């Protein structure tokens, strides 16, 4: 079986779309043929179950599994539209802080045969961020264009605990909700893509343009069941880049001509 890869999607600033990015990447990997698990680690405001339309099917949570109250086959929920996509529902407490919990989680991934795992760390505490970093192949920092969000992403990676760095997890930047309709908005406080890259000192994994279609599908729980080619192209591109493929920015989105104006 192909080597499993685990990616953490995170930000210190709320409202930047970590859950949307996590869900979109997981769906893209599943459509690409990878057995994929999306793990919701947002204790207070879980949303992956709503984005995938699974909110009425998530009866148990990760905490119950880690405490030995339920087996993994009773915990994980398979997507109704994508047979390669599964969801691990959010816990009711911070996870991976007790001895043995990380090993139990990794054993669950092994038993399930998952090839790609995406952790939604929006809203997770700093202890959880430090704990999962050591088992990840990649840390994906999400920001939007406003200065506060960019600064939060910069601080997150500058202060990351040594565990993640020692294990060699690669770090990447994702710019979400990028306003391509009004590039003059840079004058009103929004930062250019190059400025964000320079400030965070992170390699760019991808840019997600502002998309009403994407917002509508997440709100209606249709992210996995109703794909739209142009809106989903950035997720496919980023998933492909994580696999080592060279994909031009905005490929397949219909706005390729804007590459030089960022």
Image: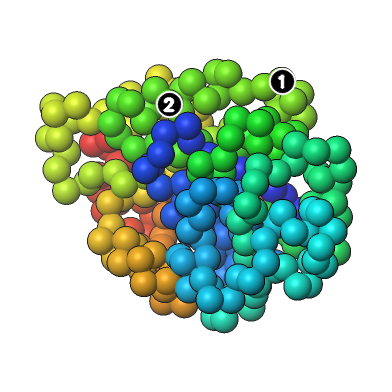
Q: Mark 2 — residue?
A: 152
Q: Is residue 64 left or right of residue 30?
A: right
Quarter of the C terminus within the rendering:
top left
Identify the secondary structure beneath mark 2.
helix
Up/down of 181 relative to 114, above or below: above
What is the count of numbered marks? 2
Q: Mark 1 — residue?
A: 162
Task: Report, in whole angstroms, how far the alpha carbon at label 1 lies from the one at label 2.
Answer: 19 Å
Up/down of 57 relative to 194, above or below: below
Identify the secondary structure beneath mark 1.
helix
Up/down of 170 relative to 37, above or below: above
**How far across and how far down the image is residue 55, in percent?**
51, 71
Residue depicted at 61% across the width and 43% down the height: 8
Q: Is residue 8 left or right of residue 179?
A: right
**How far across and how far down the image is residue 145, in percent?**
30, 34
Residue depicted at 57% across the width and 48% down the height: 43
From this viewpoint, is residue 184 visible? yes
**How far across and how far down the image is residue 109, in percent?**
79, 58
From this viewpoint, is residue 242 visible? no
For residue 140, the mark is none
Residue depicted at 63% across the width and 52% down the height: 92
Q: Is residue 240 left or right of residue 133?
A: left
Q: Is residue 228 left or right of residue 140?
A: left
Q: How packed is label 1: few (under 14 Cα within 10 Å), some, or many (20 or more)? A: few
Quarter of the N terminus within the rendering:
bottom right
**How far across and how far down the image is residue 211, in percent?**
28, 57
């Amino acid at each position: 079986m192909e080597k499993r890869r685990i990616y953490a999607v995170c930000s210190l600033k709320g409202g930047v779309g970590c859950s949307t990015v996590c869900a979109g990447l997981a769906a893209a990997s599943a459509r690409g043929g990878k057995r994929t698990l999306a793990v919701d680690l947002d204790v207070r405001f879980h949303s992956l179950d709503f984005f995938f339309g699974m909110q009425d099917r998530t009866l148990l949570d990760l905490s119950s599994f880690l405490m030995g109250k339920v087996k993994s086959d009773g915990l994980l929920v398979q997507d109704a539209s994508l047979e390669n996509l599964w969801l691990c529902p959010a816990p009711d407490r911070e996870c991976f802080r007790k001895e043995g919990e990380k090993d139990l989680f990794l054993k669950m991934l092994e038993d399930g045969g998952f090839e790609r795992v995406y952790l939604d760390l929006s809203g997770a505490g700093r202890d959880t961020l430090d704990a999962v970093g050591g088992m990840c192949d990649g840390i994906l920092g999400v920001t939007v264009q406003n200065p506060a969000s960019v600064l939060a992403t910069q601080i997150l990676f500058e202060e990351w605990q040594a565990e993640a760095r020692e294990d060699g997890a690669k770090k990447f930047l994702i710019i979400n909700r990028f306003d391509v309709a009004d590039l003059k908005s840079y004058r009103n406080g929004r930062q250019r893509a190059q400025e964000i890259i320079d400030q965070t000192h992170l390699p760019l994994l991808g840019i997600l343009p502002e998309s009403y279609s994407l917002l509508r599908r997440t709100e209606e729980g249709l992210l996995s069941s109703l794909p739209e080619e142009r809106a989903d192209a950035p997720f496919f591109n980023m998933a492909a880049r994580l696999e080592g493929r060279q994909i031009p920015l905005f490929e397949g989105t219909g706005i390729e001509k804007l590459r030089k104006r960022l």
